[in-house]
Image (cartoon, grey):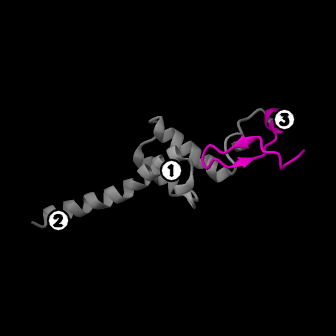
Amino acid sequence: MNKSKINHWCVICGKGYHACNTCNEARGVDLWQKFTDTSNHYRIYQIVRDYHNHIISLKKAHTLIMKCDLDGWEDFRPNVAKTISEILEYEKTKKENRKNVVTLQGM
């Protein structure tokens, strides 16, 4: 098997990689190599997909994505980076809302 022959592109970062289609089909399961170049990117894919399809809430997506390695997320495919940015804003918005509540209560 020629591992240097690119036959897949990561749905998260867009990087080309090689994955053995025959091996994946023989196992009869959807393996992360079909969609992404790393298992971490597959986890990100699942979170972004589920959030986008309204299967999980923004809060749940934030909790899950914070457990992933997000190094270089700004350079991911534009639609993925946009969704990750939206998910990461959840914590910032939550903190701002708490600050505003405390300020209003102190008046």
Residue drawn 83% across and 50% down? 4
Q: Secondary structure at mark 3?
A: helix
Q: CA distance from mark 1 to mark 3?
A: 31 Å
Q: Earlier in the sequence, mark 1 or mark 2?
A: 1
Q: CA distance from mark 2 to mark 3?
A: 61 Å
Residue farthest to the left, as pictured: 107
The residue pinned by badge 3 equals 22
Query: Is-magenta flag for residue 8?
Result: yes
Instruction: Give the number of the mark in front: 1 or 2.
Output: 1
> Is residue 75 shown left or right of residue 62?
right
Q: Along the horizontal axis of the image, is 13 left or right of 26?
A: left
Please say if 85 is above or below 33.
below
Q: In percent of the image, x 41 and y 46: which residue is there?
A: 58
Q: CA distance from mark 1 to mark 2?
A: 33 Å
Residue receiving disc 1: 81
Specify the quadrant that holds the N terminus: top right
SS for callout 1: helix
Return the residue at label 2: 103
Q: Residue furthest bottom?
A: 106
Residue depth check, mark 2 versus mark 3: number of the one nearer the observer: 3
- Residue type for callout 2: Thr
Q: Is residue 7 magenta?
A: yes
For the C terminus, which image quadrant? bottom left
How many neighbours does mark 2 have within 10 angstroms: few (below 14), some (14-19), or many (20 or more)?
few
Residue interval drawn in magenta: 1-26
Residue drawn at point x = 44 percent, y = 52 percent: 85
- Dot in front, 1 or 3: 1
Residue type (three-letter) at the residue carrying disc 1: Ala
